[in-house]
Image (spheres, rainbow, N blue to C red):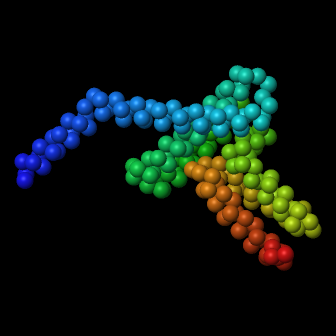
Amino acid sequence: MKVSLLAMGIALLQFTFSPVYASKTAATASYEDTAYLRVITERAGKIVTALGLPDSATFLRVRTIVANQYRDLNAVYTDRDSGKIVQQDVDAKIAKLHTAYLEKLATELTPQQIDKVKDGMTYGVVQVTYRAYNQQLPNLNDKQKAYILSTLIEAREHAMDAESSKKKHEWFGKYKGRINNYLSAQGISMKK
């Protein structure tokens, strides 16, 4: 029994490390990497196109910055999912990436353009939600409107680093809860 298990183990190792198997797994990984890079480059391109940049060189530089951010965020979440790092380390790495990313964007873009990039990364939820609050509650005063907008912008800062569309929307959901609590304390009911 021990001999047959040993033989099976050796055969498995030989198969796993054989050049044919290794090239197939490398080819699969390479294809997946290429497909992923294509997806994030297209996504970044759509975001950057909306900025109406003056020339193609600037467009390409900014698209690369945005695509690299998606890639870097994905690497952190992949490491977490594979058990290489714990959530506390994920949070620290994401915070560092966030700061560096905004610094890189600032070398190419105005603050207003950076906001458009952030909106693109978060599906324009800030504007959609802000508009919805103002339509549902037309009697909001300027202070209440400012609170709503600043809270949504804070949510966007977290959401733009989230790993999926679902997680991005969860950040906004959390902050909408804060807004609703604030409005309730102001005597405004959201149940109307």
5 sits left or right of 160 in the view:
left
Query: Which is nearer the eye, 92 or 78?
Result: 78
Q: Residue at x 64, y 34 (%)?
A: 42
Q: Is residue 149 visible?
A: no
Counting from the top left corner in percent of width and height, residue 171 is at 65, 59
Q: Residue at x 62, y 39 (%)?
A: 101
Quadrant of the rendered image containing residue 191: bottom right
Query: Which is nearer the eye, 7 or 108?
Result: 7
Counting from the top left corner in percent of width and height, residue 136 is at 87, 66
Q: Residue at x 7, y 53 (%)?
A: 1
122 sits left or right of 100 in the view:
right
Q: In which quarter of the image is the C terminus?
A: bottom right
Is 29 above or below relative to 140?
above
Counting from the top left corner in percent of width and height, residue 54 is at 79, 25
140 sits left or right of 166 in the view:
right
Q: Which residue is drawn at 64% across and 60% down?
A: 170
How many marks the image carries: the answer is 0
Quadrant of the rendered image containing residue 68: top right
182 sits left or right of 17 in the view:
right
Query: Which is nearer the eye, 51 or 105?
Result: 51
Counting from the top left corner in percent of width and height, residue 20 is at 29, 29
Q: Is residue 94 visible?
A: yes
- Residue sitting at the far right: 139
